[in-house]
Amino acid sequence: MPHDPLTPSEHLARLAEGYLTSLYDTYPTTAASLGLHDYDGRIPDIRDVARAGRVAALRAFRTQLAGIPPQLLDVEDAHDHTLLSLALDEELFELEQLREFERNPMAFSGPLDVSGYIKRNYAPLPRRVVALCEHLRQVPDYLAAAREALREPVPLPFLETALEVYAGTVLFQEEDLVRAVRPVGPGPLWTAFERANTEAIAALRRFTAYLEAEIRPRATQEFAIGEAHFQTMLSLGEMIDLPVERLLEIGRDDLSRNQAVLRETAKRIDPGADVRGVMSQQAKDHPPAERLIPEAERLLEELKQFVESRRLVSIPSAVRPRVEETPPFARWAFAMMDTSGPFETAGESFYYVTPPEPGWTPEQKEEWLRKFDYATLRDVGIHEVYPGHYVHFLHVKEIPRSLRRVLTSYSFVEGWAHYCEEMLVEEGYGRDDPGFRIAQCSEALLRDVRFLVAIEMHTRNMSKDTAARMFVESAYLDPLPAEREAARGTFDPGYLNYTLGKLMIRKLRDDLRRRGAGFSLRAFHDGLLKLGAPPIPLIRRRLLATESGAL
């Protein structure tokens, strides 16, 4: 007797499983970072023929998905149908239209990061080093393919940032990686590692020499993706279809709101000083270098207790992240959350804080520590840990549907963490500490300017220098970090999503609250996070039966 045909729900589940397997095979380093260590030791195939094969596979998945009518699915499956549809179209857009691999040398840097083999103890070190060696042996061919993929002209900001990234990669592999692997001791494994690492470093040096000699002389100042691509990026990635001019209005309104709060708060601290003077004075109130890590850890406990006492969101695990000095291979960051992947069996998550280097002068150490005043340490702790990224991904690890663990939107991931900073203020955290409000507002202004310059640079021909001036004038940044922020905006037009996501989550919360009695902030937050990190209009469809009005 023949089997009954698959139901639409079963067909979708099988298609989603096939898509994820195809995704992992295409991007094995991404799969490994998710905690799927069967993909260790593999590196993506970036040749033209492989990309063409991926495009064909995505089109085939899309055809199959179109054969599953969403109206025949229940609400959970209909959600996943949309999530998968967006993911397929977004990747096709990136491969066929944005084509970053043709003009951005940084597009190849992700699979070269081998720090995952040494920073988390998911397996005995010798086993991890075996996979590491296999990974390193593939680097020369990978970079040869990268040279073939690059098409000129390359935007100069992309090139300059890429050269910094690859120089850091070389330094990491020459020093930090060697130190981390050395405990395997002398023998065949160490010899294999030395050979593979030496050849990979040589290939990296050849690639950077090629970028300097062949690409730099013909680099261009043109970097914008254009208005059509920018709007497609938002439509497929975040389900936002508003005109650019309306987005600019929204961003300017939030910038003005936060500037007004910052000016008012600065007057409360010192009526006779300007905002920059108040911020400069506040920066002096920081822990000494030897107390930076313990103080960061103490402040996390304070934040955790506040979140739990106010019942703001569930914290699914009592396990704390380990607060440690940033490892040498990630010293570019002041502070960062390194949460274990959603499929990772090793549960270690790290909140890294970067102290000043021992060899610096007293003046250099003081300048660095001024970035870590107590108020800013609190705000960063909210964003990165409680209840920001760490709590979010504790929820993600508990989601039973793999598709929702893997497919995330930029605006939800960063929007949630940024939303939490302001939400804690609204719930009373730091109520009697205007210094904390200064820190929170300064971070909000930074994200507001990112929002505006991302749009202006990519759709309205704003130059990088003009963007840098806006960071100085509107977000009170010093010139060097302002220049860095503007440079990031040239190759990361999506960094408007910090503010975009915050505004969408805040409006969704307020719309639900206005619906009547029974609203619970904790239930709202838990309901958000249990869905993973989909585009926020998709959550509006679940909670409000409409995806419109997200902003």
Image (cartoon, rainbow, N blue to C red):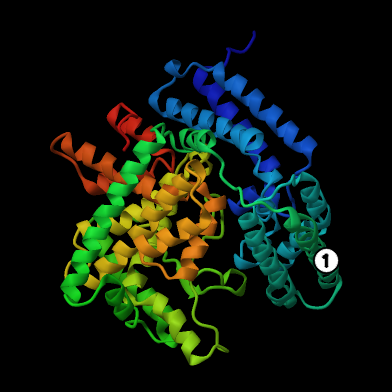
x then y, percent, for residue 379: 34, 66
**In the rendered picture of this protein, how many numbered marks are placed on residues?**
1
Quadrant position of residue 185: bottom right
Q: Is residue 5 above or below residue 312?
A: above
Image: 23 above or below 334: above
Figure quadrant of residue 425: bottom left
Asked whether residue 165 appears in the rendered view, the answer is: yes
**Relative image position of residue 492 (x, y in whole percent):** 53, 50
Of all residues shown, which one is farthest toward the left? Answer: 517
Residue hosting label 1: 202
**Measuring 83% from the left and 66% from the top, which residue is drawn there?**
202
Q: Give the secondary structure at mark 1.
A: helix
Q: Nearer the viewer, residue 332 or 291?
A: 332
Q: Residue at x 44, y 25 (%)?
A: 78
Q: Quadrant of the N terminus?
A: top right
Density class for disc 1 (Cα within 10 Å; few <14, some 14-19, many ≥20) is some
Whether residue 313 is visible: no
* Residue at x 41%, y 45% (from the top left corner): 412
Identified at 44% across, 43% down, the residue is 533
